[in-house]
């Protein structure tokens, strides 16, 4: 679609970073993307944008780098725009596209693939893929192809195209074909195979892995059941057969699964998981809809009372999203605990949220914390040191509470966030390093996540679709298998050199970016010569004649990464962007900073206990 346009306009524009503002609703054939065949028609539409706004179209494909076509179009008086055409052979591949406006804003992104129409359905052991062991029998079968036609077989191994074997076979008078055999040791790894006909058309693809029998299971996996084309925000009810298939595939690889809801079909997940011998941390999804929350709680308690849950997770990042207040969440937690007194009951949220809500800790049986070094912009080879430092911070702050990692992972594709690069290699490296850390220190965890889920691109960007250990088609991703076969890496998370940013020296704190007055951008800084797990940063702003705690009055602690970097949102209410002074204090983890709510001076004299301070007037 867009590639032929690029041939007419061979101008490449490099974009540096993502725009801070997203406007308009950009769609392909009325959706955010799908899979299409050559010969199908397409229509790009835009609505809800500013009127008479000129824009550039930008695209990334699996064969082209980032490319943009300047002066591509202009919205009408109603802020809309449309163009259409037909997919041809030059558009074959995977695409991500968006519109870039002259103001610096951009539209949402669309993601889609274009391929030749498939000529027949290929299956392995009557399925489009699966996970198999050396010594297991296999049957590859073809149905629905042209009759009496020869074909080649093509293969990828661990993401590398191996080529096609000519004249591999031919279909019978019904357009069918099959071949059987046994997986041998030299087939170990991840495979994708398809058949190619002389016409150029291909069959559907099968994706499968072959490995030695699993010797090491994960402690737990975060389980999302939504396959390609499904979106839970639409009220979709997950079919029970789908849950059986998805849970059954991963059952040999883990001892626990964690779900994210108890209604719309997910009420059957606990029962099905137990049938496969798995333990279940059953999620009760909470948001700002009290009626929906009531349905979730009733369903979650029913599942527990029927013996289909081993742990109850009441809400997931409800405080981080500001869907509930701390007091509202505590009421829900106490209600569930009272109804199921023998259950392990908690909620899930970021470790920063747990540090800033001790009242929440007191009503939960365990701390269930999320940590994503990727979203913090940390390099993958420093990510587990960052996780370890954060874990130690929380452990030191709440020494009497058990801590379980509720989410941690790394996407295999998508945008870079600071120094964090999403790639198949980094995704596999993070899983190996994470599991090595957890096994070495006997940490309990739920790894994020089981399968790729396409629907998450709407809220997370392109990387939202690539968090899975398995693809959305059920293929174990390249590089993941060795973790289940017992591979580990040595300790690279507790080296004092990695835990003391800047090395030995006098503790210091500095601002690395101070947003100008009137801006809503975040304040960033760096703390050096201190172990990040032993300290935190307290930030205060002076606005309208008074001092205020940031980022929130009830969240006074800003965590320090393992590299010493820290970020604080200083515009979380009122006229914060007009603050004329900013103060930051590097404080020991045991120090409880006083809260400022418009005080004439910073309360509690934190400077007396701080090992370093930073101040700026703007």
Image (cartoon, rainbow, N blue to C red):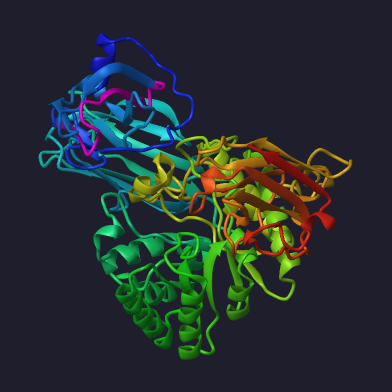
Q: In the picture, residue 270 is in which quadrant?
A: bottom left
Q: In the picture, residue 215 is in which quadrant?
A: bottom right
**Which residue shows up at 57% across the image and 48% down it?**
570
Residue 182 appears in view: no
Q: Quadrant of the N terminus?
A: top left
Q: Which of the pair 517/294 is nearer the observer?
A: 517
**Which residue shows up at 14% across the image and 42% down it?**
144
Q: Is residue 336 above or below residue 378?
A: below
Q: Is residue 313 above or below residue 118?
A: below
Residue 481: x %, y % from top left: 54, 48
Magenta segment boundaries in residue numbering = 42-66
Residue 1 appears in view: yes
Q: Quadrant of the C terminus?
A: top right
Q: Is residue 9 above or below residue 110?
A: above
Does residue 349 belong to the magenta stretch? Answer: no
Q: In the picture, residue 403 is in which quadrant?
A: bottom right
Residue 301: x %, y % from top left: 40, 84
Residue 409: x %, y % from top left: 54, 51
| Side (left or right) of 105 relative to 188 | left
**Which residue shows up at 20% across the image and 27% down it?**
75
């Amino acid at each position: 679609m867009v590639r032929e346009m690029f041939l007419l306009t061979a101008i490449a524009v490099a974009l540096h970073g993502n725009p801070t503002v997203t406007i308009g609703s950009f769609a392909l054939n009325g959706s955010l993307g799908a899979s299409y065949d050559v010969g199908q028609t397409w229509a790009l539409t835009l609505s809800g944008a500013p009127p008479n706004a000129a824009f550039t179209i930008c695209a990334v494909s699996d064969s082209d780098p980032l490319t943009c076509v300047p002066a591509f179009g202009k919205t009408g008086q109603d802020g809309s725009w449309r163009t259409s055409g037909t997919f041809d052979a030059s558009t074959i591949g995977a695409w991500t596209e968006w519109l870039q406006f002259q103001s610096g804003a951009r539209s949402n992104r669309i993601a889609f693939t274009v391929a030749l129409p498939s000529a027949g359905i290929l299956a392995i052991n009557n399925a489009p893929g699966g996970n198999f062991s050396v010594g297991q029998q296999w049957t590859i079968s073809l149905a629905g192809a042209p009759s009496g036609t020869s074909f080649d077989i093509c293969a990828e191994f661990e993401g590398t195209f191996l080529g096609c074997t000519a004249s591999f076979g031919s279909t019978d008078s019904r357009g069918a074909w099959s071949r059987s055999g046994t997986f041998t040791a030299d087939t170990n790894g991840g495979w994708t195979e398809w058949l190619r006909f002389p016409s150029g058309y291909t069959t559907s693809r099968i994706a499968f892995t072959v490995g030695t029998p699993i010797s090491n299971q994960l402690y737990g996996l975060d389980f999302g059941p939504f396959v390609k084309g499904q979106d839970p925000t639409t009220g979709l009810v997950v079919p029970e057969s789908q849950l059986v298939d998805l849970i059954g595939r991963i059952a040999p690889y883990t001892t626990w699964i964690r779900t994210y809801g108890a209604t719309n079909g997910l009420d059957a997940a606990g029962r099905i998981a137990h049938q496969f011998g798995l333990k279940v941390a059953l999620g009760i999804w909470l948001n700002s809809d009290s009626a929906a929350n009531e349905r979730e709680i009733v369903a979650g308690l029913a599942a527990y009372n029927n013996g289909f849950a081993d742990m109850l997770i009441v809400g997931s990042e409800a405080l981080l999203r500001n869907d509930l207040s701390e007091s509202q969440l505590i009421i829900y937690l106490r209600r569930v605990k009272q109804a199921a007194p023998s259950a392990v009951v908690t909620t899930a949220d970021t470790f920063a949220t747990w540090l800033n809500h001790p009242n929440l800790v007191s009503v939960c049986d365990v701390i269930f914390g999320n940590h994503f070094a990727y979203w913090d912009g940390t390099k993958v080879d420093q990510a587990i040191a960052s996780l370890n430092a954060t874990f130690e911070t929380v452990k030191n702050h709440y020494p009497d509470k058990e801590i379980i990692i509720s989410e941690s992972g790394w996407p295999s594709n998508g945008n870079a966030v600071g120094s964090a690069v999403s790639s198949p290699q980094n995704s596999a490296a993070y899983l190996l390093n994470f599991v090595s850390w957890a096994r070495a220190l006997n940490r309990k965890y739920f790894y994020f996540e089981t399968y790729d889920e396409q629907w998450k691109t709407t809220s997370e960007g392109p990387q939202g679709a690539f968090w899975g250990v398995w693809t959305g088609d059920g293929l174990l991703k390249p590089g993941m298998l060795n973790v289940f076969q017992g591979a580990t890496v040595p300790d690279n998370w507790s080296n004092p050199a990695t835990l003391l940013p800047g090395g030995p020296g006098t503790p210091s704190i500095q601002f690395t970016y101070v947003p100008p007055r009137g801006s809503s951008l975040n304040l960033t800084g760096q703390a050096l010569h201190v172990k990040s797990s032993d300290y935190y940063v307290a930030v205060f702003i002076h606005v309208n004649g008074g001092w205020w705690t940031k980022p929130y009055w009830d969240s006074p602690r800003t965590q320090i990464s393992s590299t010493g970097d820290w970020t604080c949102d200083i515009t979380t209410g009122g006229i914060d962007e007009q603050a004329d002074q900013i103060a930051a204090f590097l404080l020991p983890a045991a120090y409880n900073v006083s809260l400022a709510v418009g005080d004439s001076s910073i309360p509690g004299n934190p400077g007396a206990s701080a090992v370093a301070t930073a101040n700026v007037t703007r």
